[in-house]
Amino acid sequence: MIGLFQEDILEFDGRSSRAHGDGRDPAYPGAPVGFLAHAYRTPSRVVTSAELEDSLGLGRGVIKRLTGIERRGYIGRGESLQSLAVGACRDILFKSGLKPLDVDCLIFYTDSPPVMPDGAGHRKVFYDVSAHIQYILRESGVELACECVGMAGSCVSFLHASQMAVGLVRSGMKKNVLVVGAACNSLFLESTDKNVAMTFGDGAAASLITASSDVGLIDIFCMTDGQGYDAGCYPEYRSLFIDRKRVSDFAPRGFHAALKGLLARTGLRIEDIDVVIPHQAGIKIIERGMALAGVPWEKVYLCLQDVGNTGAPAVQMALARAEEEGRLAEGNLVALVAFGTGWNYGAAAFRYHDARSGR
């Protein structure tokens, strides 16, 4: 059986690497591609760890000690996965100054089962959420007339969707791609394990990927080892199941393998990277991943203390929050690191440019 992190696999990646520090990839001719802007939305209902400890019968301070999380957002009355995603889309169009009609593709991803708003509640039904997001935007006056694509996946889905967007732009098939991720984990926590329930929150994020005159995206590395295909699921569409032992064993090594694969492909070194934004899985997982990869604390951005683990959009939300908080400086080399059930793991490197600076 093929192992998850055999050295020969990573060494092969290193031998075949393409050190494209100028932001161009020989396999994808054309103009450099970059992020134009980022935005995020969190629900209005804030649930503190103290409140959750009371409801789960846990001692005071346990959740923060185990996860680093102090609060998270749960979808409240009148909110939905769709409303959070639509809000993030509105915010990013306003922030970027891009006209809605100039967006020619929307890629939506999630790792939550589709849930359709139904009056004051939610109806669990499988359908095309990406088209629904476009419909809501258009009904509210945002003229988004474009192709819409939906993806289901893991906590690496933002990188998977970004790969698709980059390929579409570099090939000339699209000009401006809106990548939107959202999750409504709280709707599936009522009967789940306490250790899972204490971790997850809801949220959404959006990013615009476009051709750029600046050096933007350098590379994205993603890999899958299918041995973790059953480590997380929604049994009978009712609750979130996570195989905690297997996930906690894989996640730090996934962090390490993702970053190692990215560095091998690009020829970059840890010391070249200014900011590392990891999947906000939990403080202990991130600490162990950092130790394996040799990443110093001063390079790492965290927001899990405020939003919890939002699953699929966690890395994208963290990226948007880092930008909002001024953690990213013009020209910074940023690494995004993601890992999730599947097993999936991946990382991306890009030069940060602030759209507000008039580029």
Image (spheres, rainbow, N blue to C red):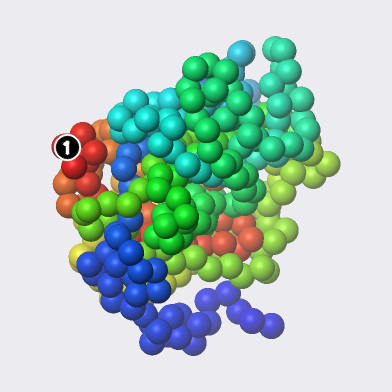
In the image, taking residue 200 as reference, residue 324 lies left or right, namely: left
Residue 291 coordinates in the image, percent (x, y): 36, 64
Whether residue 109 is visible, yes or no, is yes
Q: How many marks?
A: 1
Whether residue 197 is visible, yes or no, is no
Q: In which quarter of the image is residue 316?
A: top left
Tell which of 284 and 275 is nearer to you: 275
Residue at (61% x, 79% y) in the render: 3
Residue at (63% x, 34% y) in the render: 131
Residue at (72% x, 49% y) in the render: 233
In the image, taking residue 7 as reference, residue 322 lies left or right, namely: left
Determine whether 100 is above or below 15 in the image: above
- Residue under numbered circle 1: 358
User: What amino acid does circle 1 point to?
Assistant: Gly
Tell which of 127 and 189 is nearer to you: 127
Quarter of the image that includes the C terminus: top left
Residue 44 coordinates in the image, percent (x, y): 49, 17
